[in-house]
Structures are given as C-alpha cells and as structure tokens.
Amino acid sequence: MQKETPQIDYAALADSIKAWGKALGFQAVGISDTHLDEAETHLLRWLADGHHGAMDYMAKHGVKRARPAELVPGTLRVISLRMNYAPARAKDARQVLAQGEQAFVSRYALGRDYHKVLRNRLEKLARQIRAEVDCQCRVFTDSAPVLEVALAQKAHLGWRGKHTLLLSREQGSAFFLGEIFIDLPLPVDTPQDNHCGTCQTCIEVCPTQAIIAPYRVDARRCISYLTIELTGSIPVELRPLIGNRIYGCDDCQLFCPWNRFAQTSDEPDFAVRNGLDDVTLVELFTWDEAAFHARLEGSAIHRIGHEQWLRNIAVALGNAPPAPEISAALQARMNHPSALVREHVAWAQTRHQ
C-alpha cells in the first residue's frame, strides 16, 4: 500500500515560522509571493539611466533580481525578516556630524559585520523549518541579487521610502533585512501601505543631492557609494560635500520623521567596537595597514581595505576645521606608496592652505 503524504497546515506553519524568527532575534517576519513586476520595471530603468555607477554586479544577473523563482528554481514564497541594528550605547550621530574633526561611521557598521550575524540566524531558522517539514529553502543576506526592499514591503514589513530604504511605522529604518526563499505555498501577508505622504525631508537633507526624485537615487552621487563601493578617485566636486563621513552616510535616515520611532538593538554583535562612534579623524588616519586589519577584521568596514580607508579619511580631513594636528597628519601621509592616497591627501592639504 502506498504511504499517504501527510497534509501540511500551511497557515499554522507560517505562524510557527514567524514565532521561531522572533525567538532568534528578528523583530518582524513576513511572507510574500514572488511577483515583482513593478520593481523589475524600476530596476531596469535605474540600470538604463546608469545610476548604479561602477556597481556592475547590479546588472550582472539581469532580471533574476526581480524573479526569485529564476534565481532559485522552485521558489514559491519569500520569508522576509527584519533585525534592528542601532547600538544602544553610541554617541549621538548628529553630534558627531556637527564636529568636523570627528569621524562619522554609518551606524550599521559600528559593530560586527551584519552579513555574518544575519546569515547565522537565518540558517538556524531554515534548519528549524526543514526539521518540521520536507522542503527546500535558501537564505540571503544582501549576498545575492535579491530585491529585498520590494519583497519586504510585500511581506508587510514596511514600505519603500522616498530614499528607497524600507520604513516601518513602528521602528523607522534602522534595521537589516534578510530573506529565505522556500518552495512551499505558505499564506502571504498583505503588502504594506506607503506612509511618506508629502514629506521630502530625505531629499532635502541629502548632502550630495543623490536622491534626484522620490524613490530614485543616483548612486554615483551617494556618499555611501563614494566611500564604500567606489574604489577609485572620488570626484573632486563631491569631496567638500562629504564632510566628515568616512564610511557611509545616514542623513536620509537620521532626519526622517519616522525614525523618531527607531529602536536600539540589544544584539551584542552590533555593539560599538574600537570606539568608532566617538573618535577623531587624526587618530584613525594614523592606523597603519596592520592596525587596520587587526582592529577591523570581522567588521563591514574591513572589506574596503586600508587604501580606501585612508582615501576617505583624507577627504574628511580636508573638510575639517583647520588645526595643527590635522596639517601634521596630512603631511605624514603625503608620500604614501598609494597614488590614490597621495592624490586625496594633496587635495586635503590645499584646503588648509
């Protein structure tokens, strides 16, 4: 006699998955289908306009980014998850930005590399799901061509803000996103409505005016792109606008009204490391390559490398208030082996003449 396949209560399973996710430290869990036609149209237009800059990987996989079932054959649903990252004990970001001699590091990068933290938790959840039911699932943490904001909005985790990041009425935007692609027909959540209204604060406060229209960002002008993704010379006309931001930029989030609801994280891995929330540019500029690797290994910052690190700090020093210690720090690096570093140091020195 043929053995009957047990019936699966998908609604109960979905409830269990959400409970398991929250037990693993995620603040919200939602489920969506795989249809991203509108997001695909937006992506193709963005690429055609060249707004991805030197991020060739954004175009490498073509429309697979918007078609989960092509990226992972058999995918029927996507489980999206949110995890808060703002450190509970970090110096106020606006205070750091207002002190030109201080180094501003995007709040998400003050602790351990989030890719490792999220992947570990997502894998645990995937194992728990597999232990409950026979299925195929694959996890993603900004590590593959996935339109995570569009998926998270469909899964009721928030809505796409005019700065293109996900926003939540309960928790602002200070969180990471992760996904699990799964081949089960789980019940889906209702997509989140947009609550930006007529507000354009993020567009108005962007230091480089990278948000060229609501929901459209020209990455080539974005400080996060310039300090992280761009490996060559930073355009001269944009350097003065970078201020003291040496890794990323949070302005569009810091001044967003919804982020008055942002919550801090009690996740130990996201706690501030190496005092990066309250440190001078001069101090960081003295780190040699060995110190850079020793102190930042395991951090998201580590992947940009020491040369790019010095390039970024040189620009910030050029924007800093004049001081003898800043001139001395630049002088000490003017003959650095890297042409890229020397170029940006020379530019910074002209700003203090």
Image (cartoon, grey):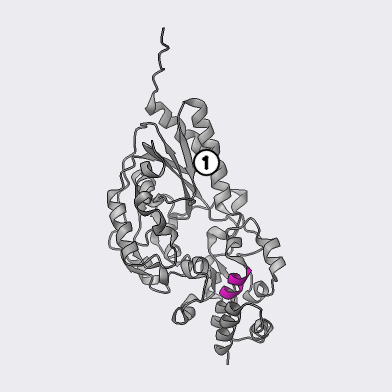
Which contiguous range is marked in magenta?
A: 306-312
Q: Check disc 1 and report the residue beneath it.
A: 122
How crowded pointer 1 is (Cα within 10 Å; few <14, some 14-19, many 20+) is rated as: many
- What quarter of the picture does the C terminus occupy? bottom right
Of residues 60 and 223, the one drawn nearer to the viewer in this rendering = 60
Taking the spot 61% from the left edge, 50% from the top edge, the residue there is 269
- Type of amino acid under label 1: Leu
Would you say residue 321 is visible in this rendering? no
Q: Where does the image place residue 262, in percent across and percent down from the top left?
A: 46, 54
Taking the spot 66% from the left edge, 78% from the top edge, the residue there is 337
- In the rendered structure, the answer to whether residue 176 lies left or right of residue 50 reads right
Quadrant position of residue 56: bottom left
Of residues 169 and 156, the one drawn nearer to the viewer in this rendering = 156
Looking at the image, is 3 positioned above or below residue 292? Answer: above
Q: Where does the image place residue 205, in percent across and percent down from the top left?
A: 40, 71
Asked if residue 8 is among those painted magenta in the image, a careful observer would answer no
Would you say residue 70 is visible in this rendering? yes
